[in-house]
Image (spheres, rainbow, N blue to C red):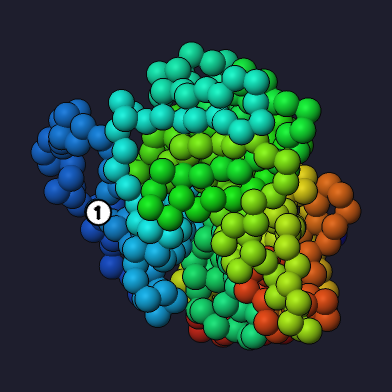
Amino acid sequence: MTDQSQPSTTRRGFIKAGLATGGAIAAGGAAGAAEPDPLITEIQPWAQGLGDGVDAVPYGLPIEYESDVVRRNVPWLTADVISSINFTPIHALDGTITPQGCAFERHHSGAIELRKEDYRLMINGLVDTPLVFTYEDLERFPRESHVYFCECAANTGMEWAGAQLNGAQFTHGMIHNMEYTGVPLRTLLEEAGVQPEGKWIFVEGADASSNGRSMPLEKAMDDVLVAFKANGEALRKEHGYPVRLVVPGWEGNMWIKWLRRVEVTTQAIESREETSKYTDTLADGTSRKWTWVMDAKSVITSPSPQSPIKHGPGPLVITGLAWSGRGAIERVDVSTDGGKTWQTARLAQPGQPMALSRFYLDIDWDGSEMLLQSRAMDSTGYVQPTKAQLREVRGLNSIYHNNCIQTWWVKESGEAENVEVS
């Protein structure tokens, strides 16, 4: 039997005790109690007058008190912001859908302005009928909506040689998860009529870099979308307005923005972005190419360096994100002792293929140090590796496709730091 004379150590008991204390304070309490809370006992300014009308902000914006939840750049990563990266504030978000205004940017020659009226998409090469589509043409085709993550191949790339960037936003923030709406690329290719010799496609953007990439025809005819909406509204300029390519589960460099041309070819074009860039350099100096798929990965977003524990010991929600380009997330384990022991976290929803999953682990923190880690497992049976396991295969010279287990050292103060525990 439970000893009722002892204070409850359950989460519910902790909260009930807090409410009881709060009630005593509000009522004035017994001798020695704290002063009444004026936020409860006094009428506040916001309750003494009228608020804004419905037309005060025609397009809704975050309230000023959330002004810190923004994308951030790391200036020394690149020579100029025109060809650079900023990072999704994953430490400050919850759920799985990324607001467009928070979704990371990666540009090779800057974000361009292209009107819908000026938009054209060409399908050419080994097709029966070369075609050019306007934006209005695309809107007339049957469309689909799917939630997918987009992750830059260089996400977590700075961490290969050791703990570098102190924050989940900077180590893992080159990712977003949005509901994309558009026309299957397969539909447009079938409209043009792919010839039997066609085995690959080459896709280009309308910006100065064009960012051309080759893709096997098999993938193009499977689940690739020509998208013109994200999260229910038009794409943002920085995400390829008015039309971009969505390549589920594959590295973000292939999600061509401002999509202007799809050429059907017999073989890969071997462009700059698939030879000197976006290949995985191994320890012996050789490079792996065609490593398009993003393997299973996860990160704890809170507690983390940008989201420290502020409330002291007691109930604590450990939360984070997990994803896989090969299928759905089926399980996430969390360790508080650097991987010595693991507990299975709770998934907010059953995992969806090529989409972010949110996980939670509810604990009672005793105020001692923790080495927080998360480990994802996907529907193929793949288990997220340690950094040591990745290094055994690829050495230290890689940049791309680092999906290792991340460690946060949470101190007694609640502050957290990026550390390496291989």
Q: Which residue lies at the image location 62% right of the left edge and 74% below the top edge?
A: 399
- 146 shown above or below 154: above
Q: Which residue lies at the image location 73% right of the left edge and 41% below the top edge?
A: 266
Question: Looking at the picture, how far across and down is residue 247, in whole percent?
Answer: 62, 42
> Which quadrant of the figure has residue 398?
bottom right
> Which quadrant of the figure has residue 119?
top left
Residue 254 left/right relative to 393: left
Q: Residue furthest right?
A: 381
Question: Looking at the picture, how far across and down is residue 281, in whole percent?
Answer: 70, 75
- 264 shown above or below 341: above
Q: Nearer the viewer, residue 288 or 35?
A: 288
Decide: few, some or many residues near mark 1? Use Cα within 10 Å; few <14, some 14-19, many ≥20: few
Which amino acid type is marked by label 1?
Glu
Q: Which residue lies at the image location 32% right of the left edge and 47% below the top edge?
A: 112
- If the image is split into quadrants, where does the C terminus sit? bottom right
Q: Nearer the viewer, residue 400 or 49?
A: 400
Specify whether residue 364 is in view.
no
The residue carrying mark 1 is: 64
- If the image is split into quadrants, where does the N terminus sit? bottom right
Q: Tag 1, which secondary structure?
A: helix
Q: Nearer the viewer, residue 414 or 349?
A: 349
